Image (tube, helix red, strand yellow):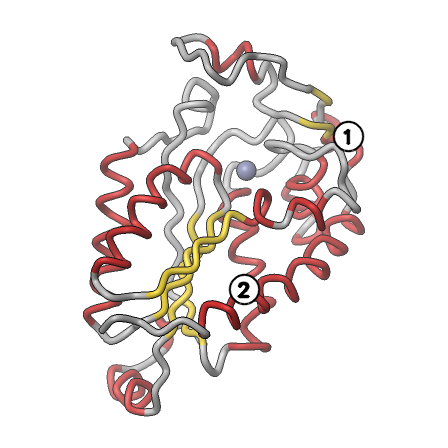
Amino acid sequence: MYLAELTSHRFVELREQGVNTVLIPIGMLEAHGEHCALGTDTLIPREFARRLEPLVGDKVVIAPEIPYGHSWGLAPFPGTLDIPGQVFADYVTAVGTQLVKQGFRYVILLNGHGGNMAALTLVSERLSDLGAVVLSINWWVDYRDLIVEHAPEFGHAGEDETSCVLAIDPKLVEMEYAHRHISEAPKKIRFRGLQKLTYPHANNGDATKATAEKGEAIYKALIPAILRDIEEMWSYTPNA
Ligand SMILES: [Zn+2]
């Protein structure tokens, strides 16, 4: 079920029935190569939520997504809206805090964007301090062993992400602008201008190999893994 579609009355009823798990899809508006939709990092978590809803929607309330995030790495590229990391961390913490105050004891952060990860670690710690059990999922990292079976040339707007967007709607991708690029820039060194050296076409991996079929296979492989992680989360007892 979707939080935004519940009435206040129904919300109280669900709380009395013991429904205490919320899932927040978290994304970004950011250049994804020259070929993939700017909202890719929001579209994919939204798609995971859509596919999870018929399976666990009676126990997991899906909150409205957070579509803006933090991206130092892709900030110089057209279409990226880079929210400062501290502001993003505080905002998501505030949303999560309200959800905990409203009775949720299990919080799933379903993230689609690498630049959000450091901030979401802080968010997870702060919500845990409020007594919640937090499941923090970065899908392309946490389930990479499953992803590489279908899209070995993964990366930002690479084979995996582009395939996942094609599976949602091929109109969201302009495959004629897809590139292959493997970054060799050092991860330990940071300076202004590094971004375009690292990602000359705002992507990493091989987007030219992406297909809707591979995207569909990735969703099919990951949904059971996410369900297992949710079950494991429920095996832990919240503090409050
Ligand atoms: Zn992305």
Q: Position of residue 70 (x, y in %)?
A: 36, 34
As drawn, 128 above or below 189: below
As drawn, 106 above or below 173: below
Looking at the image, which residue is at 58% across and 77% down? 54
Mark 1 falls on what kind of element? helix
Q: Residues within 10 Å of mark 1 (few under 14, many from 20)?
A: some
Using the image, tell me which numbered label, if any, was put on residue 132: none
Using the image, tell me which numbered label, if any, was put on residue 229: 2
What kind of residue is marked 2?
Answer: Asp
Mark 1 highlights which residue? 208
What kind of residue is marked 1?
Answer: Thr
Q: Position of residue 160 (x, y in %)?
A: 69, 41
Q: Position of residue 117 (x, y in %)?
A: 42, 40
Would you identify the image quadrant in which residue 153 lies? Answer: top right
Q: Position of residue 215 (x, y in %)?
A: 72, 50
Considering the image in quadrants, where does the N terminus appear?
bottom left
Mark 2 falls on what kind of element? helix
Q: Is mark 1 within 8 Å of ligand 1?
A: no
Would you identify the image quadrant in which residue 53 lies? Answer: bottom right
Q: Residues within 10 Å of mark 2 (few under 14, many from 20)?
A: some
Looking at the image, which residue is at 76% across and 41% down? 151
Considering the image in quadrants, where does the C terminus appear?
bottom left
Residue 210 horizontal side relative to residue 169, left or right: right
Residue 154 horizontal side relative to residue 142, left or right: right
